Amino acid sequence: MLNKIKEDSALKFSKVLLIAPEFYTYHNDLFNAFKKISEQVVFYSEMNQTTLYRLSGRLSQSLKKRLEKKHIEGLLTLSENEKFDAVFVVRGVCLTPDILTTLKNNIPNAPFYLYQWDSYQQNDYRALIPSFDSISTFDFKDAEELRLRYQPLFYSDVYRDICLLKEDKLYDLVFYGAYHSDRLKIIKHFQKLLCEQGLVFKSHLYIKKIPLFFRLLKGEISFSDLRFFKTYSVSANEIAQSYSKTKAVLDIELSIQSGLSIRTFEVLGSGVKLVTTNANVVKEAFYNPAQIMVIDRNAIKADLSFFESSSSDCDVKCYHIDAWLEKILESTQLESN
Protein backbone atom coordinates (compact mmCIF):
# COMPACT_ATOMS: atom_id res chain seq x y z
CA MET A 1 0.00 0.00 0.00
CA LEU A 2 2.99 2.29 0.34
CA ASN A 3 2.97 2.82 -3.43
CA LYS A 4 0.14 5.31 -2.81
CA ILE A 5 2.67 7.76 -1.43
CA LYS A 6 3.75 10.40 -3.90
CA GLU A 7 7.08 9.94 -5.62
CA ASP A 8 7.77 13.64 -6.00
CA SER A 9 10.58 14.45 -3.54
CA ALA A 10 9.02 17.83 -2.77
CA LEU A 11 5.98 16.37 -1.06
CA LYS A 12 2.83 18.36 -1.70
CA PHE A 13 -0.77 17.47 -1.08
CA SER A 14 -4.01 18.94 -2.31
CA LYS A 15 -6.06 18.20 0.79
CA VAL A 16 -4.98 16.57 4.05
CA LEU A 17 -7.22 15.16 6.77
CA LEU A 18 -5.51 15.64 10.13
CA ILE A 19 -6.98 13.65 13.05
CA ALA A 20 -5.31 14.49 16.35
CA PRO A 21 -5.98 15.26 20.01
CA GLU A 22 -6.73 18.86 20.95
CA PHE A 23 -3.81 19.00 23.33
CA TYR A 24 -2.42 22.40 24.31
CA THR A 25 -1.42 24.02 20.98
CA TYR A 26 0.15 20.96 19.38
CA HIS A 27 -2.77 20.29 17.04
CA ASN A 28 -2.46 23.89 15.81
CA ASP A 29 1.28 23.43 15.30
CA LEU A 30 0.62 20.32 13.22
CA PHE A 31 -2.11 22.08 11.27
CA ASN A 32 0.21 24.98 10.43
CA ALA A 33 3.03 22.64 9.41
CA PHE A 34 0.71 20.81 7.02
CA LYS A 35 -0.50 24.14 5.61
CA LYS A 36 3.00 24.63 4.24
CA ILE A 37 2.83 21.43 2.17
CA SER A 38 -0.88 21.18 1.38
CA GLU A 39 -3.32 23.43 -0.40
CA GLN A 40 -5.97 22.56 2.19
CA VAL A 41 -5.90 20.98 5.65
CA VAL A 42 -8.99 19.78 7.50
CA PHE A 43 -8.59 19.14 11.22
CA TYR A 44 -10.88 16.70 13.01
CA SER A 45 -10.51 16.37 16.76
CA GLU A 46 -9.67 12.90 17.98
CA MET A 47 -12.37 13.15 20.65
CA ASN A 48 -15.62 14.96 21.24
CA GLN A 49 -14.67 18.26 22.90
CA THR A 50 -18.05 19.31 24.27
CA THR A 51 -18.60 19.92 27.98
CA LEU A 52 -21.40 17.35 27.91
CA TYR A 53 -19.00 14.68 26.67
CA ARG A 54 -16.40 15.52 29.33
CA LEU A 55 -19.08 15.06 32.00
CA SER A 56 -20.78 12.05 30.41
CA GLY A 57 -18.35 9.53 31.87
CA ARG A 58 -19.57 10.44 35.34
CA LEU A 59 -23.21 10.86 34.34
CA SER A 60 -23.99 7.92 32.09
CA GLN A 61 -21.86 5.43 30.18
CA SER A 62 -24.64 5.00 27.62
CA LEU A 63 -24.67 8.77 27.02
CA LYS A 64 -20.90 8.74 26.63
CA LYS A 65 -21.08 5.96 24.04
CA ARG A 66 -23.82 7.78 22.10
CA LEU A 67 -21.71 10.94 21.96
CA GLU A 68 -18.66 8.96 20.85
CA LYS A 69 -20.69 7.27 18.13
CA LYS A 70 -22.01 10.63 16.92
CA HIS A 71 -18.46 12.01 16.81
CA ILE A 72 -17.24 9.09 14.69
CA GLU A 73 -20.25 9.38 12.41
CA GLY A 74 -19.24 13.00 11.80
CA LEU A 75 -15.76 11.85 10.80
CA LEU A 76 -17.10 9.20 8.44
CA THR A 77 -19.51 11.67 6.85
CA LEU A 78 -16.61 14.08 6.34
CA SER A 79 -14.56 11.36 4.68
CA GLU A 80 -17.44 10.58 2.29
CA ASN A 81 -18.07 14.18 1.28
CA GLU A 82 -14.51 15.49 0.92
CA LYS A 83 -11.71 14.37 -1.38
CA PHE A 84 -8.50 13.88 0.60
CA ASP A 85 -5.18 12.73 -0.77
CA ALA A 86 -3.54 12.05 2.62
CA VAL A 87 -4.70 11.15 6.11
CA PHE A 88 -2.46 11.86 9.10
CA VAL A 89 -3.48 10.49 12.49
CA VAL A 90 -1.85 11.31 15.82
CA ARG A 91 -2.54 8.70 18.51
CA GLY A 92 -5.98 7.64 17.23
CA VAL A 93 -7.72 6.51 20.42
CA CYS A 94 -11.08 7.13 18.76
CA LEU A 95 -10.33 4.69 15.95
CA THR A 96 -10.86 0.96 15.57
CA PRO A 97 -9.90 -1.35 12.67
CA ASP A 98 -13.53 -1.30 11.46
CA ILE A 99 -13.66 2.51 11.49
CA LEU A 100 -10.35 2.64 9.63
CA THR A 101 -11.66 0.18 7.03
CA THR A 102 -14.60 2.49 6.37
CA LEU A 103 -12.31 5.53 6.23
CA LYS A 104 -10.00 3.81 3.75
CA ASN A 105 -12.95 2.77 1.60
CA ASN A 106 -14.18 6.38 1.61
CA ILE A 107 -10.69 7.71 0.80
CA PRO A 108 -9.32 4.91 -1.37
CA ASN A 109 -6.30 6.58 -2.94
CA ALA A 110 -4.81 8.33 0.09
CA PRO A 111 -1.86 7.11 2.17
CA PHE A 112 -2.70 6.76 5.87
CA TYR A 113 -0.01 7.92 8.31
CA LEU A 114 -0.02 7.18 12.04
CA TYR A 115 2.21 8.97 14.53
CA GLN A 116 2.24 7.74 18.12
CA TRP A 117 3.20 10.09 20.94
CA ASP A 118 2.07 7.52 23.52
CA SER A 119 3.51 4.09 24.22
CA TYR A 120 1.12 1.20 23.70
CA GLN A 121 1.49 0.70 27.46
CA GLN A 122 -0.41 3.98 27.80
CA ASN A 123 -2.62 3.74 24.72
CA ASP A 124 -2.77 0.31 23.11
CA TYR A 125 -2.80 1.03 19.38
CA ARG A 126 -1.44 -2.33 18.23
CA ALA A 127 -4.71 -3.40 16.59
CA LEU A 128 -4.53 -0.32 14.33
CA ILE A 129 -1.09 -1.05 12.89
CA PRO A 130 -2.23 -3.14 9.87
CA SER A 131 -4.56 -0.34 8.74
CA PHE A 132 -1.81 2.23 8.15
CA ASP A 133 0.67 2.68 5.33
CA SER A 134 3.18 4.42 7.57
CA ILE A 135 3.65 4.26 11.34
CA SER A 136 6.13 6.21 13.45
CA THR A 137 6.48 6.22 17.22
CA PHE A 138 8.30 8.40 19.74
CA ASP A 139 8.85 5.40 22.01
CA PHE A 140 12.14 3.45 21.93
CA LYS A 141 10.67 0.23 23.27
CA ASP A 142 7.62 0.30 21.01
CA ALA A 143 9.81 0.86 17.96
CA GLU A 144 11.99 -2.11 18.84
CA GLU A 145 9.27 -4.51 19.96
CA LEU A 146 6.73 -3.69 17.24
CA ARG A 147 9.35 -3.04 14.53
CA LEU A 148 8.14 0.49 13.89
CA ARG A 149 10.04 3.57 12.78
CA TYR A 150 11.46 5.51 15.71
CA GLN A 151 10.82 9.23 15.34
CA PRO A 152 11.15 11.54 18.37
CA LEU A 153 8.84 14.52 18.85
CA PHE A 154 9.20 18.13 17.69
CA TYR A 155 9.28 21.77 18.69
CA SER A 156 7.62 24.78 17.07
CA ASP A 157 8.58 28.32 16.09
CA VAL A 158 7.68 29.83 19.45
CA TYR A 159 10.51 27.87 21.12
CA ARG A 160 13.01 28.25 18.29
CA ASP A 161 12.63 32.03 18.46
CA ILE A 162 13.69 32.12 22.12
CA CYS A 163 17.28 31.70 20.96
CA LEU A 164 17.05 35.19 19.48
CA LEU A 165 16.05 36.77 22.80
CA LYS A 166 18.55 38.07 25.35
CA GLU A 167 16.46 38.04 28.49
CA ASP A 168 17.75 38.33 32.04
CA LYS A 169 17.57 35.01 33.87
CA LEU A 170 15.00 35.28 36.66
CA TYR A 171 14.82 31.55 37.42
CA ASP A 172 17.29 28.74 37.87
CA LEU A 173 14.75 26.04 37.07
CA VAL A 174 11.17 25.97 35.82
CA PHE A 175 8.61 23.24 35.31
CA TYR A 176 5.36 23.23 33.31
CA GLY A 177 3.20 20.16 32.97
CA ALA A 178 0.09 18.26 33.94
CA TYR A 179 -0.17 16.29 37.15
CA HIS A 180 0.49 12.57 36.87
CA SER A 181 2.52 9.74 38.42
CA ASP A 182 5.36 11.01 40.65
CA ARG A 183 5.60 14.55 39.35
CA LEU A 184 4.45 16.09 42.64
CA LYS A 185 7.11 14.20 44.61
CA ILE A 186 9.91 15.32 42.28
CA ILE A 187 8.71 18.93 42.19
CA LYS A 188 8.59 19.04 45.98
CA HIS A 189 12.15 17.69 46.11
CA PHE A 190 13.50 20.38 43.77
CA GLN A 191 11.52 23.14 45.49
CA LYS A 192 13.17 22.24 48.80
CA LEU A 193 16.65 21.64 47.34
CA LEU A 194 16.85 24.86 45.36
CA CYS A 195 15.26 26.99 48.06
CA GLU A 196 17.86 25.77 50.56
CA GLN A 197 20.61 26.88 48.19
CA GLY A 198 19.09 30.27 47.44
CA LEU A 199 18.10 29.28 43.91
CA VAL A 200 14.76 30.09 42.29
CA PHE A 201 12.39 27.36 41.14
CA LYS A 202 9.14 28.16 39.33
CA SER A 203 6.62 25.38 38.73
CA HIS A 204 3.20 25.11 37.15
CA LEU A 205 1.76 21.68 37.94
CA TYR A 206 -1.60 21.68 36.20
CA ILE A 207 -4.75 19.81 37.19
CA LYS A 208 -8.38 20.60 36.45
CA LYS A 209 -10.62 21.52 39.37
CA ILE A 210 -12.91 18.47 39.26
CA PRO A 211 -10.06 15.89 39.15
CA LEU A 212 -8.31 17.83 41.92
CA PHE A 213 -11.44 17.67 44.06
CA PHE A 214 -11.79 13.89 43.63
CA ARG A 215 -8.09 13.28 44.34
CA LEU A 216 -8.41 15.30 47.53
CA LEU A 217 -11.40 13.20 48.56
CA LYS A 218 -9.48 9.98 47.90
CA GLY A 219 -6.45 11.26 49.80
CA GLU A 220 -4.19 11.03 46.76
CA ILE A 221 -3.40 14.72 47.20
CA SER A 222 -3.19 16.34 50.63
CA PHE A 223 -4.50 19.80 51.43
CA SER A 224 -0.97 20.86 52.40
CA ASP A 225 0.15 20.14 48.83
CA LEU A 226 -2.43 22.41 47.20
CA ARG A 227 0.18 25.18 46.96
CA PHE A 228 2.01 23.15 44.32
CA PHE A 229 -0.98 22.96 41.95
CA LYS A 230 -2.51 25.30 39.40
CA THR A 231 -6.04 24.76 38.10
CA TYR A 232 -5.57 26.88 34.98
CA SER A 233 -3.52 26.16 31.90
CA VAL A 234 -1.09 28.57 30.26
CA SER A 235 -0.36 29.31 26.62
CA ALA A 236 2.69 28.15 24.70
CA ASN A 237 3.74 31.80 24.46
CA GLU A 238 3.69 32.18 28.25
CA ILE A 239 5.69 28.98 28.70
CA ALA A 240 8.17 30.16 26.09
CA GLN A 241 8.54 33.47 27.90
CA SER A 242 9.42 31.61 31.08
CA TYR A 243 11.94 29.50 29.18
CA SER A 244 13.60 32.66 27.90
CA LYS A 245 14.10 33.78 31.53
CA THR A 246 15.39 30.54 33.02
CA LYS A 247 18.70 28.70 33.08
CA ALA A 248 17.12 25.23 32.96
CA VAL A 249 13.82 23.40 32.60
CA LEU A 250 12.73 20.28 34.49
CA ASP A 251 11.30 17.38 32.48
CA ILE A 252 9.52 14.50 34.26
CA GLU A 253 8.35 11.92 31.75
CA LEU A 254 5.62 9.34 32.27
CA SER A 255 7.57 6.43 33.72
CA ILE A 256 5.79 3.71 31.70
CA GLN A 257 7.02 5.31 28.46
CA SER A 258 10.57 5.28 27.13
CA GLY A 259 10.21 8.02 24.51
CA LEU A 260 11.54 11.53 25.00
CA SER A 261 8.86 14.04 25.92
CA ILE A 262 8.02 16.97 23.67
CA ARG A 263 9.41 19.20 26.42
CA THR A 264 12.86 17.79 25.65
CA PHE A 265 12.83 19.34 22.20
CA GLU A 266 11.08 22.54 23.18
CA VAL A 267 13.73 23.19 25.82
CA LEU A 268 16.75 22.26 23.72
CA GLY A 269 15.28 24.07 20.71
CA SER A 270 15.10 27.15 22.94
CA GLY A 271 18.81 26.91 23.76
CA VAL A 272 17.96 26.30 27.43
CA LYS A 273 19.43 23.59 29.68
CA LEU A 274 17.44 20.46 30.45
CA VAL A 275 17.10 18.47 33.68
CA THR A 276 15.33 15.20 32.89
CA THR A 277 14.33 11.91 34.47
CA ASN A 278 14.54 10.18 31.09
CA ALA A 279 17.92 8.44 30.80
CA ASN A 280 17.19 7.47 27.18
CA VAL A 281 18.26 10.95 26.11
CA VAL A 282 21.91 9.85 26.39
CA LYS A 283 21.34 7.57 23.38
CA GLU A 284 20.60 10.49 21.08
CA ALA A 285 23.20 12.04 18.78
CA PHE A 286 22.42 15.50 20.16
CA TYR A 287 23.12 14.52 23.79
CA ASN A 288 25.50 16.94 25.50
CA PRO A 289 26.08 16.51 29.26
CA ALA A 290 26.97 20.19 29.56
CA GLN A 291 23.42 21.02 28.44
CA ILE A 292 21.45 18.01 29.70
CA MET A 293 21.46 16.65 33.27
CA VAL A 294 19.88 13.22 33.78
CA ILE A 295 18.51 12.44 37.24
CA ASP A 296 17.24 9.24 38.83
CA ARG A 297 13.61 9.82 39.82
CA ASN A 298 13.94 7.23 42.61
CA ALA A 299 17.16 8.64 44.10
CA ILE A 300 17.41 12.27 43.05
CA LYS A 301 20.89 13.77 43.09
CA ALA A 302 21.49 17.05 41.33
CA ASP A 303 24.82 18.80 40.82
CA LEU A 304 23.83 22.41 41.44
CA SER A 305 26.91 23.67 39.58
CA PHE A 306 24.96 22.70 36.45
CA PHE A 307 22.85 25.83 36.92
CA GLU A 308 25.86 28.11 37.11
CA SER A 309 27.81 26.92 34.06
CA SER A 310 27.11 28.56 30.72
CA SER A 311 24.78 26.97 28.17
CA SER A 312 26.25 24.75 25.50
CA ASP A 313 24.84 23.58 22.18
CA CYS A 314 22.59 20.67 21.25
CA ASP A 315 21.91 20.34 17.55
CA VAL A 316 18.17 19.67 17.38
CA LYS A 317 17.33 21.63 14.22
CA CYS A 318 16.04 18.45 12.55
CA TYR A 319 13.33 18.29 15.22
CA HIS A 320 11.77 21.61 14.31
CA ILE A 321 8.21 20.69 13.32
CA ASP A 322 8.68 21.49 9.62
CA ALA A 323 11.78 19.29 9.35
CA TRP A 324 10.15 16.67 11.59
CA LEU A 325 7.08 16.37 9.36
CA GLU A 326 9.17 16.28 6.20
CA LYS A 327 11.29 13.50 7.69
CA ILE A 328 8.22 11.37 8.49
CA LEU A 329 6.76 11.80 5.02
CA GLU A 330 10.03 11.39 3.13
CA SER A 331 11.17 8.34 5.10
CA THR A 332 7.87 6.72 4.23
CA GLN A 333 8.40 7.61 0.62
CA LEU A 334 11.82 5.94 0.63
CA GLU A 335 10.29 2.75 2.01
CA SER A 336 7.86 2.63 -0.89
CA ASN A 337 10.61 2.68 -3.53
Image (cartoon, helix red, strand yellow):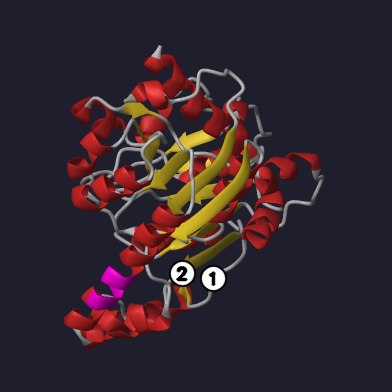
Q: Which label sits on residue 206?
A: 2
Q: Which label sits on residue 297?
A: none
| Mark 1 touches mark 2? (CB < 8 Å) | yes
Name the residue: 44% across, 15% down.
334
Q: Which label sits on residue 233?
A: 1
Q: Quadrant of the N terminus?
A: top left
Residue 115 lies, in percent from the top left, at 39, 40
Front position in the image: 143 or 217: 143
User: Residue 68 colored magenta?
Assistant: yes
Determine crowd level at label 1: few under 14, some 14-19, many 20+ residues with C-alpha closer than 10 A: some
Q: Which residues are magenta?
A: 66-70
Name the residue: 46% across, 58% down.
44
- For the residues labelled 1 and 2, the Cα–Cα distance comes to 7 Å
User: Residue 101 colored magenta?
Assistant: no
Name the residue: 62% across, 64% down.
235
Q: Amino acid at mark 2?
A: Tyr
| Element marked by disc 2 | strand
Q: Amino acid at mark 1?
A: Ser
| Residue 280 drawn above or below residue 238 | above
Residue 105 lies, in percent from the top left, at 30, 44
Residue 330 lies, in percent from the top left, at 50, 22
- Give the dominant element type of the magenta stretch: helix, strand or loop: helix
Q: Quadrant of the C terminus?
A: top left
| Element marked by disc 1 | loop
Q: Is residue 180 found left or right of 230 in the rendered image?
A: left
Q: Earlier in the sequence, mark 1 or mark 2?
A: 2
